[in-house]
Image (cartoon, rainbow, N blue to C red):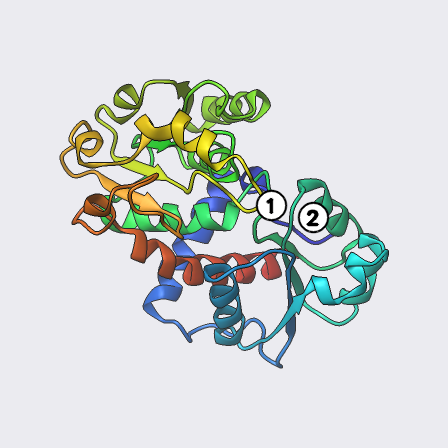
Amino acid sequence: MPRHFLRDDDLSQAEQAEVLQLAQEMKRDRLGRSPLAGPKAVALLFDKPSLRTRVSFTVGVAELGGLPVEIDTTKTHIGRGETIGDIARVLTRQVAAITWRTAGQERIEELASASTVPVINALTDEFHPCQILADLQTVIEHLGALAGRTLTFFGDGANNMAHSYLLGGVTAGLHVRIAAPAGYQPDPAIVAKAQQIGAATGGSAVVVDDPVVGAKGADVLATDVWVSMGQADAQERAAALASFQVNQELLAQAAPDAIVLHCLPAHRGEEISAEVIDGPASVAWDQAENRLHAQKALLAWLLEHA
């Protein structure tokens, strides 16, 4: 059976460390490995708009010696009645792996259940695990070992980034804090799962409703847009989340060498101030680049373990 990467805890702590080490090696030597030589094809399915995911997977597959096959699913039968299982059965006879940026997590799980090749979650409403791998790689580059560091996510704690920080961060041995107001806090089941993982890895997971408490002594401050694709309550969200903006005052509460993560796109003046994202603590552009290296490493690792 193939290995899939549908959510962050699909990798154990040791497996995640292997992928991150491979990502660092691939960054140093971008064309040093060709597991997709042939070329073998990888299907890149997109239900939603994308820049970083689209570019990083397309370039990454090519650099691994493969053929990226980008598919806008709105122009296929997947949006007109063909079952997800049938799509998987067609694709897996022709490609070496499948990535999918879609909506509900149940959709990618259905695809994986019928697939005979690795399936990678390129973003769902519930999780964004490839982004977290890139973020962890970025933290290693700037701060060294992950275990024991504190990472706080500010803003909409119920979104896919917060859920993935909980699972992926705690898997790496991080102390993960989600700083979010009532009504915008993560799924309790995800928090409980992260705490369960942390009991084995030395990490931890907590939810706080005070941004200053969240920032106090943190090594990494992270945020994401307040209004995701398809959400219509922009004004209500802005009012509820205003005090959770990552700005210079909040950064001053963190550790002296703290870094700031943002998965982009950024709305300066909303979830993050221009002063911070364009300032010396920001590593957002390293994050964006590391999507390429982390995803190449993940693809190569999954193919080796298929």
Q: Position of residue 51 (x, y in %)?
A: 48, 62
Above or below for 58 versus 84: below
Which of 288 and 268 lies nearest the eye of the viewer?
268
Above or below for 37 versus 8: below
Above or below for 25 versus 159: below
Q: Residue 290, located in which quarter of the rendered image? A: bottom left
Q: How many numbered dots are placed on residues in this image?
A: 2
The three-letter code of the residue at mark 2 reads Ile
Q: Position of residue 132 (x, y in %)?
A: 44, 45
| Mark 2 element type | helix
Q: Residue at x 39, y 54 (%)?
A: 21
Q: Is residue 181 visible?
A: yes
Proximity of marks 2 and 1: CB atoms separated by less than 8 Å: yes
Q: Residue 6, located in which quarter of the rendered image? A: top right
Label 1: few (<14), some (14–19) or many (≥20) C-alpha neighbours in 10 Å: many
Which disc number belongs to residue 50? none
Outermost residue, front side: 235
Q: Position of residue 128 (x, y in %)?
A: 52, 45
Q: Is residue 175 visible?
A: no
Q: Is residue 156 left or right of residue 175?
A: right
| Mark 1 element type | loop
Above or below for 119 versus 255: below
- Badge 2 is on which residue? 108
Q: Nearer the viewer, mark 2 or mark 1?
A: 1
Which disc number belongs to residue 124? 1
Question: What is the C-alpha distance between the residues marked 2 and 1?
Answer: 8 Å
Q: Residue at x 28, y 19 (%)?
A: 213
**In the rendered structure, which disc, 2 or 1, sits on the residue that comes first in sequence?**
2
Which quadrant is the C terminus positioned in? bottom right
